Image (cartoon, rainbow, N blue to C red):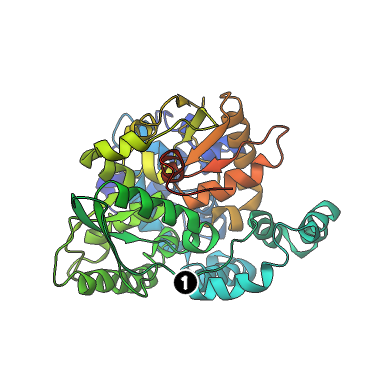
Amino acid sequence: MQPPLLDPCVHCGFCLPSCASYRVLGTEMDSPRGRIHSLKAIEAGELTLDATVASHFDSCLGCFACVTACPAGVRYDQLLEQVRPQLNNPSLRTPWQRQLRRLLLALLPYPQRLRALMLPLQAYAGTPLQQLARSSGITRLFGAEIAAMEQLLPPLPPQAKDPVGLIPAEGPRRARVGLVLGCVQRVFDPGVNAATLAVLAANGVEVLLPEGQGCCGAVSHHQGELKQTQALAMDLVGSFNRAAANEPLDAILVAASGCGHTLKQYPQLLAGQPGFKAVVKDVHEFLYELGLSDSFKARLKPLKEALVVYHDACHMIHGQGISQQPRQLLRAIPGLELREAMEAGVCCGSAGIYNLVQPEEAAELGAIKAADLINSGAAMVASANIGCSLQIRQHMLEQKKPLPVAHPMELLARSAGLLEFG
């Protein structure tokens, strides 16, 4: 552990109200301040990183809200990145915890494997059979983690091949970009990528989609599995650099904030290795800087859901410092009124695979988030991260008046008449 990262903490407690794990567990050791105290004790030889101490780090969602809140500038995000690989020591978790993580990291970053698993589940997800299984409580017999996976399983769209090749710009070309499709997003919510491509094309942006592009490594990165993350990252970089060899790209775009946070860390993760030949930007960040075209703005029509509450994904607002760009893009929709949640900076409980490996804490946070969004008085939730969207949709089902959840690109595409949504 690097002592300079620990030194700025003065244990003032400003991080506590923003900390999601402290919010639901209420214990000092499950707060950023408590974890930093543990790290200092370990550094001084006064404490050992055993299974008990490790459990307090496993309870951290890695939402980085404490980084935003800290008046002393403590880089807890960098501290956590140093600790997470150590948590994978076999002695620190039970065999079941290790096997579950191994299974998830062998499945989620590989879209073809994920699609193969989803095919037989299409006859179950979103059907009366799923409703019966949930209401009977039979899924809980398989354990909290398996029940959490089933709860997150949404109605599955027909599995289609990934879009590949070059998507031309409409009218004069204003920019040329690549788009990272994401792994979970392309399988569970492919409409987001379809909407993103449509909005970009309608704004004069040409989009390159390398064939066979893989995972960015965000899921494994969040779990401290650096070798897997680096291998996935190098494969993704190679696919885009080869596809753009003849004509450079202005940017590499991503429409899922969890992926975007990891993609922007490639210079550190791949130090000494080739990186992207173009800058990485979140799609909202890019479109805001480019500006919506006059022809696109002329197409925008009011939406049925005029009141929209925007959900700040943690890896967007805290990880990338992106907050106003998606809001400004949504305000371009005629008649749309944005509402704000009271606790916009508190994590929803998704946090990569956190809601699968820490289901009780995640469920409590999901319920808090759903209620907070509903209390805004909005008729629709806009969320720019697939994990957040799945988590919020699940916990909306527990509310008396659940709100639908859509990606901002879907709302822009719907307003412009580019795509139809159910």
Residue closer to the observer: 314 or 56:
314
Give the image quarter of residue 206: bottom left
Instruction: Let me know if residue 43 appears in the view.
Output: no
Residue closer to the observer: 124 or 85:
124
Q: What's the residue at 25%, 36% (across, down)?
A: 294
Q: What's the residue at 52%, 39% (across, down)?
A: 20
Label 1, residues with CA under 10 Å away: few <14, some 14-19, many ≥20? few
Q: What's the residue at 60%, 68% (across, down)?
A: 100
101 in relation to 366, above or below: below
- Indicate the secondary structure of the residue bearing disc 1: loop
Instruction: Identify the residue under disc 1.
Output: 161
Where is residue 349 drawn, in percent x and y? 55, 45
Q: What's the residue at 32%, 59% (across, down)?
A: 179
Looking at the rendered structure, the number of numbered marks drawn on it comes to 1
Instruction: Let me know if residue 144 appears in the view.
Output: yes
Residue closer to the observer: 287 or 52:
287
Where is residue 404 drawn, in percent x and y? 59, 40
Q: Quadrant of the N terminus?
A: bottom left
31 in relation to 145, above or below: above
Where is residue 197 drawn, in percent x and y? 36, 55
Q: What residue type is labelled 1?
A: Lys
Residue closer to the observer: 211 or 257:
211
Left or right of residue 284, residue 399 in this image: right
Where is residue 316 drawn, in percent x and y? 38, 43
186 in relation to 340, above or below: below
406 in relation to 159, above or below: above
